[in-house]
Structures are given as structure tokens and as C-alpha cells.
Amino acid sequence: MRIRIEVGVLGATGMVGQQFINQLAGHPWFDLVWLAASERSSGKRYADAAPWRLDTPIPEGVADRTVEAATPGVGPRLVFSALDAGVAGPLERAFADAGHLVVSNARNHRMDPTVPLLVPEVNADHLALLRTQAKLRSSSPATPASRAEKTSRGPTPGVARSTVRSATPSGIGVSSRHAAASA
Ligand SMILES: NC(=O)c1ccc[n+]([C@@H]2O[C@H](COP(=O)([O-])OP(=O)(O)OC[C@H]3O[C@@H](n4cnc5c(N)ncnc54)[C@H](OP(=O)(O)O)[C@@H]3O)[C@@H](O)[C@H]2O)c1
């Protein structure tokens, strides 16, 4: 039996978040279990919080979900981030510090030498950089609570950036048409 992986989307109500949802809903590997956005959307029904802009309808089961606050430590370990660049830097870092693996479409950590820039079909092995990133992060100040959380969630949480633009057996991403539209 194939193991399924629970995933969440940060910035789920935005344009790129909708692309993530579209590609994650009904995915053969992933269960989309968590939708998070700003306090403006938190507590609202997804369909009321998100002005759905894609040509395809909102995937089944998503419209009635409640949008949650983007609180580090809450939600599944693996989160795809479509956060506004104005908040993605510290917020994605806080999620990584709390033990999440963050795969981001935001630009904020792009130039960080310990953040792998991934095209999974080409350089999936660059994920090994997450070990270096985790080591550096663990040597920076953290609260006892965040350390305990990090340990309980596994060895290599971190931030990665994916430039993948299509769904393939080895990756999830944003289609070039919509990525260009929201750039
Ligand atoms: N990879 C690419 O090709 C590509 C292309 C375009 C954009 N991007 C990047 O992808 C990201 C999203 O772009 P977009 O066009 O989808 O933006 P958008 O439509 O403005 O969506 C931004 C999302 O961030 C959420 N957000 C804003 N402030 C927040 C906060 N303080 N806490 C938690 N969530 C917050 C918003 O939630 P609310 O709805 O509740 O406000 C919304 O879900 C940006 O960083 C952008 O630069 C990447």
C-alpha cells in the first residue's frame, strides 16, 4: 500500500495558492489537509475567502473548508508556500524553525546558499542541502519549545524553493501560464 503524505498550503487564498490547490487536490501521493492564509481570511469558508480565478472549478471538498491562520507548528509537516513576498521571509523561516518542510514559490529565500532551488526532475539530490540548513538553523538562537517541536518532526525540516511549472510523477508546481499571470 502506498503511503500518502499530508500537505498544506500557505497563502492558499491567493493566485499561486489556487494553483497549488488545483494540483494537490486528488493527487496520487498527497492529501491536502490544511489551507492557511492571513488573519483576513482565517476562520472563513475557503470559497468566501478566496476569489477563485482559475478556469477550472474549485476542487471537490475545498470550497467548504475553513481557512486557518498561518501559525508555525500547526498543520502538516510538508507545506507548499504561496505567501505574499512581504511576509514570506520571516514566516517561512518560522515554519522551518517549527519543524516544517517548506517548499516555496516566493522569492525571499532564493539567494540563500543553503536553500535548494529545485527542479525535481533535474536536481532532486540538492535536497541534501536541507541538512546543512538545519544544522545552521539549530546553531542559531531558538526557544526550547521550538527545538522540541523540531526534533519531534524529523531530521530535515527547512525551506526549499521549487521552480517546477508542471505536475509530473516527481514534482508539483505552478503552470507557466498562471505563474506568468501572477508575476
Ligand atoms: N513562482 C512563480 O512563478 C511565481 C509567480 C508569481 C508569484 N510568485 C510568488 O508567489 C507568491 C504568491 O503570489 P500571488 O500572486 O499568489 O499573491 P496573492 O494573490 O496576493 O496571494 C498572497 C497570499 O498570501 C497570503 N498572505 C498575505 N499576508 C499574509 C500574512 N501576514 N500571513 C499569512 N498569509 C498572508 C494571502 O492571504 P489573504 O488572502 O488572507 O490576504 C494570500 O493567500 C508571492 O511571493 C509571489 O512573488 C511566484
Image (cartoon, grey):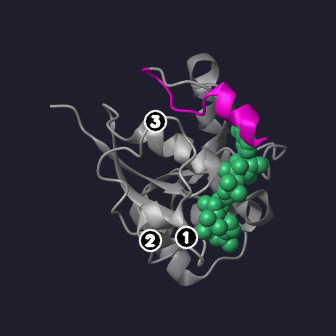
Judge: label 2 CB < 8 Å from ligand 1: no
Q: Which residue is mark 2?
A: 74
Q: Report whether 9 appears left or right of 89.
A: left
Figure check: 168 above or below 154: above
Q: Quadrant of residue 19?
A: top right
Residue 84 seen anywhere in this rendered image of the structure: yes
Judge: label 1 CB < 8 Å from ligand 1: yes
For the residues labelled 1 and 3, the Cα–Cα distance comes to 26 Å
Figure check: 155 above or below 144: above
Magenta span includes 178: yes
Q: Residue at x 81, y 47 (%)?
A: 112
For the residues labelled 2 and 3, the Cα–Cα distance comes to 29 Å
Single out the residue that lies furthest toward the left: 1
Q: Residue at x 27, y 41 (%)?
A: 4
Marks 2 and 3 in Cβ contact (< 8 Å): no
For the residues labelled 2 and 1, the Cα–Cα distance comes to 8 Å
* Residue 182 screen position, x and y as percent: 73, 42
Q: How many residues crowd around disc 1 within 10 Å: few (fewer than 14), some, or many (20 or more)?
A: many
The magenta segment is 169-183
* Residue 91 screen position, x and y as percent: 67, 67
Query: Which residue is at the front of the view, 25 or 76?
Result: 25
Q: Residue at x 76, y 61 (%)?
A: 89
User: Which quadrant of the figure contains the C terminus?
Assistant: top right
Q: Tag 2: residue type?
A: Val
- Dot 3 falls on a residue whose secondary structure is loop
